Amino acid sequence: MRLYTWNIAVSGALWGGFHVLEIGLRNALHAQMSASTGREDWWNSISLHTLERRKIDAAVRSVDREKGARATPGHVVAELTFGFWVALLANRYHQRLWVTTIEAAFPHLRGTRRALHTKLERLRMLRNRVAHHEPVFARDISADHALILEVLDSIDPTMKRWVREYSRVPHLLECRDDMVDGHWPMTF
């Protein structure tokens, strides 16, 4: 029971980093795509694979239902999933989007697009585990948290510093054994 309680606590703590990562990623990619195409609804002027096109279409329909005439491209951007943004870094978009546009969204990247995509895919899968209340206590949460910070640093070092300063993950990692052994108060 104590390990499960710690799992709930660390899962909740991961959300802060995911929050900043998802918004930072989508805003950086949206800014580059908008600048490249000269329009906020850049998805209407580029060719996307079927899956990403379907996700865009679904987001547009959802925003239209909810906002009607008040719908803006910003609403559509916010409606798109983390998985959508990660998919734009896949190999199938290397020449079409990465080389021409998206690479500039990662001005501090150390490494390749492929490695970045692999890291983001790993984080997407962890995010989904947390969102579906699956156990994460057997993972190397310290490495996962470091990965969030590394990707944030590639976009904007300020975001990395912000998450590093305010994240509860390091504290929960430090006191895990004490919490599980009953020497530290259990909270989530």
Image (spheres, grey):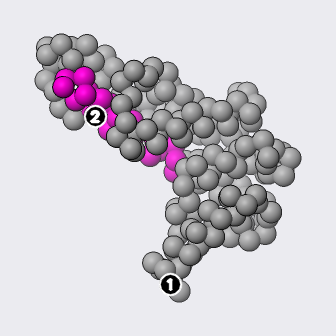
Residue at 69 percent of width and 64 percent of height: 53
Q: Between residues 73 and 132, which one lies in front from this camera angle?
A: 132
As measured in the structure, the alpha-carbon distance from the residue carrying label 2 to the one carrying label 1 is 38 Å
Q: Is residue 133 left or right of residue 80?
A: left
Q: Quadrant of residue 150?
A: top right
Figure quadrant of the C terminus? top left
Residue at 36 percent of width and 24 percent of height: 137
Q: How crowded is the residue under tag 1: few (<14 C-alpha within 10 Å), some, or many (20+)?
A: few
Q: Magenta residues, as a range?
A: 1-23
Residue 8: assigned label: 2
Q: Quadrant of residue 141?
A: top left
Q: Between residues 96 and 170, which one lies in front from this camera angle?
A: 96
Q: Which mark is nearer the camera, 2 or 1?
A: 2
Badge 1 amino acid: Gly
Give the mark, 2 or 1, whose residue is nearer the N terminus: 2
Residue at 43 percent of width and 38 percent of height: 129
Q: Position of residue 80 (x, y in %)?
A: 56, 60
Q: Is residue 7 left or right of residue 25?
A: left
Q: How crowded is the residue under tag 2: few (<14 C-alpha within 10 Å), some, or many (20+)?
A: some
Q: Is residue 166 magenta?
A: no
Q: Is residue 31 visible?
A: no
Q: Between residues 12 and 20, which one lies in front from this camera angle?
A: 12
Badge 2 amino acid: Ile
Residue identified by numbered label 1 = 68
Q: Position of residue 178 (x, y in %)?
A: 21, 14
Figure quadrant of the N terminus? top left
Q: Is residue 82 visible?
A: yes
